[in-house]
Structures are given as structure tokens and as C-alpha cells.
Amino acid sequence: MGMKGITIKLPERTLQQLKEQARQTGRTVTALVRERVETPPDSAESSFFALTSDLAGSLAGGRRPATNNRRRFRRT
């Protein structure tokens, strides 16, 4: 299996964290990035509910549904 290369730009803090983890584990930064790209996301953490659960109840508004009342838009 051949390999192709890509270039990614990371924030300095992220790169430093990767370098530190690579040093601690004795692996390369490239190996760590490749592992994260190839590993499928945990279905419990990547579900729509998991991604938005912290937003539940954070919106204020009336109890009426947000639908258009067509009578308001009729031409007279």
C-alpha cells in the first residue's frame, strides 16, 4: 500500500502537545496523527446528541412553534 502526504496546519499549542505525547510514548508525531485519523470516532462521543447535549435548555423563547402563520403573509 503506497502512501501519499498531506500538509496540515495546527495551532502551536496542539503541536506542542503532540510533540510532548510523542516524546513520552517514544513514537513520532506523524504516527500519532496517523493513528488519530485512522481510528473511527467513538460512536457515543460523536453522536449528534453527545455533540449538542450541552446546549439543551440554553435557548430562551416562547412555547409556540417556530412555524410561519400563512395568514399573515396573504395579499389583501
Image (cartoon, grey):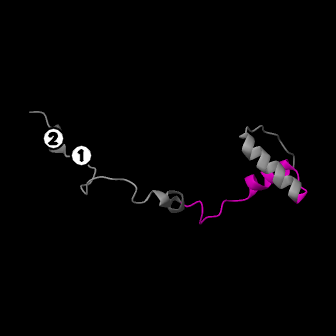
Give the residue at the far right of this rendering: 26
Per the rendered image, the range of residues in magenta is 25-47
Sort mark 1 into few (<14), some (14-19) or many (20+) by Cα contacts within 10 Å. Answer: few
- Residue 33 x/y as whole percent: 78, 50
Question: Mark 1 and 2 residues: CB-CB less than 8 Å, in contact?
Answer: yes
Q: How far, Cα to Cα, is label 1 from label 2?
A: 8 Å
User: Where is residue 41, by image quadrant?
Assistant: bottom right
User: Where is residue 27, by image quadrant?
Assistant: bottom right
Q: Mark 2 belongs to which amino acid? A: Arg
Q: Nearer the viewer, residue 6 or 22?
A: 22
| Residue at the spot of label 1 | 68
Secondary-structure class at tag 1: loop
Q: Residue at x 77, y 50 (%)?
A: 17
Q: Which mark is residue 72?
A: 2
Q: Is residue 19 left or right of residue 46?
A: right
Q: Residue at x 45, y 56 (%)?
A: 55
Q: Nearer the viewer, residue 18 or 72?
A: 18
* 30 in relation to 7, above or below: below
- Residue 28 x/y as whole percent: 88, 51
- Residue 19 x/y as whole percent: 83, 48
